[in-house]
Amino acid sequence: MSIVAERLKRIKPSPTLAVSSKAKELKAAGRDVIGLGAGEPDFDTPNFVKSAAKLAIDNGETKYTAVDGTPELKDAIIAKFKRDNDLEYTRDQITVGTGGKQVLFNALMASVNPGDEVIIPAPYWVSYPDMTLIAEGTPVIVECSKDNNFKMTAKELEAAITPKTKWLIFNSPSNPTGGTYTYDEIKALTNVLIRHPHVYIMSDDMYEHLVYDGFEFATPAQVEPVLKDRTLTCNGVSKSYAMTGWRLGYAGGPKELIKAMAKIQGQSTSNPSSISQAAALEALNGDQSFLAERNDAFAQRRDMVVERINATQGLECFKPEGAFYVYASCAGAVGKTTPDGKIIETDEDFVTYLLESEGIAAVHGEAFGMSPYFRISYATSTQNLTEACTRIQRACDALK
Ligand SMILES: Cc1ncc(COP(=O)(O)O)c(C=O)c1O
């Protein structure tokens, strides 16, 4: 009999982490690989944040803290929610965890009963369905049309709701598409949810600050205050502040849920690193002007990648207004034959071909619940991206 629990059979390892480690492995073996799989900024953590962490170490802030965050960090998060989102929370409505991932995981573990349904618009961030399955819930995947830039409509949401629905997981800007919901688009969804008082909203705002072309970010609890008591507004410092390795995420939501999440954290990891909490406090309270500079760089890279992809035979994509991803269709490559005589049947075949022929590591659309697509992360240097686009173009031109 296997040592591995039955519950693990329901889930798969994170495909995005798998692509990153495959790219690293090939690089270590001497291959010239350009990684477009990673979901992390290539920029470094800002110096003022690093200094706060060093100071925390020197000041002896090296002990256990309150399980779900220090009062000081909670106050900084409360101030952030007020400043950026016009949302008012008290300390007992705030939780802090080891990355945005842990916060989402805790929320599902704390709230989902066996058979509860969790609505997940596709394409989705890879972990939502698997986290739901670990929590013994049922993911209800709703495929969102490319014609609407992969965003869920009110009609689609309405049709997916059943008496068993517990959550809608909402993510804007989106990983993997970079798509962003406007205030009015969110309002259309919240209007539906008002009519279904048993449904909660988990809003994953991880890419809040990574928006371009003057796009104005909004989050459901802000758009529809009536739903605030049914909304968990999740965020973190990983992406906006280039702090992926520090592992620090947070959320604001109903007290009962926040308390239940702390119970899980208290019996698993306890508090997130005291040093990371001190750093996050500084990130949230400090000068935010570096964000605009970095966003300019991201927007320029995005423009270049979108233009080059749309100029490549068999590929196409829309221009997203957020995050640092492009979700490109490879429908025009499917059915074609590689120079080695292999037929590209799926988007996974396509990304495998890119990796083997040109050393380009990207993630196939099937991992995000919608095919045939592939995700490019443009959180890497312009030089790398230019070379990557040339190689992708060459690979596509070589298909017959
Ligand atoms: C949409 C989305 N939510 C949450 C996370 C988790 O972020 P963290 O690194 O803080 O756990 C990610 C990271 O890739 C993400 O893309």
Image: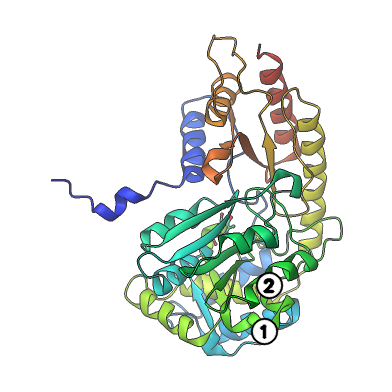
Residue at x-position 70% and y-position 71%: 219
Residue hosting label 2: 190
Q: Residue furthest right?
A: 214
Q: Is residue 400 above or below residue 26?
A: above
Residue position for label 1: 226
Q: CA distance from mark 2 to mark 1?
A: 9 Å
**Residue shown at the point (58%, 71%) measured from the top left:** 201
At horizontal 58% and vertical 45% (from top left) the residue drawn is: 38
Screen quadrant of the C terminus = top right
User: Looking at the image, do the residues carrying marks 2 and 1 touch, with CB atoms under 8 Å apart?
Assistant: yes
**Residue shown at 55%/45% (left/top)?**
368
Secondary structure under tag 2 reads helix
Image spot of residue 268 (x, y percent): 33, 71
Residue type indicated by callout 1? Val
What crowding class fits label 2: few (fewer than 14 Cα within 10 Å), some (14-19), or many (20 or more)? Answer: many
Relative vertical location of residue 358 with respect to residue 321 in this rendering, above or below: above
Residue 360 pos. (x, y %): 60, 29
Q: Earlier in the sequence, mark 2 or mark 1?
A: 2
Q: Quadrant of residue 309?
A: top right
Quadrant in the rendering for residue 172: bottom right
Q: Nearer the viewer, residue 86 or 26?
A: 86
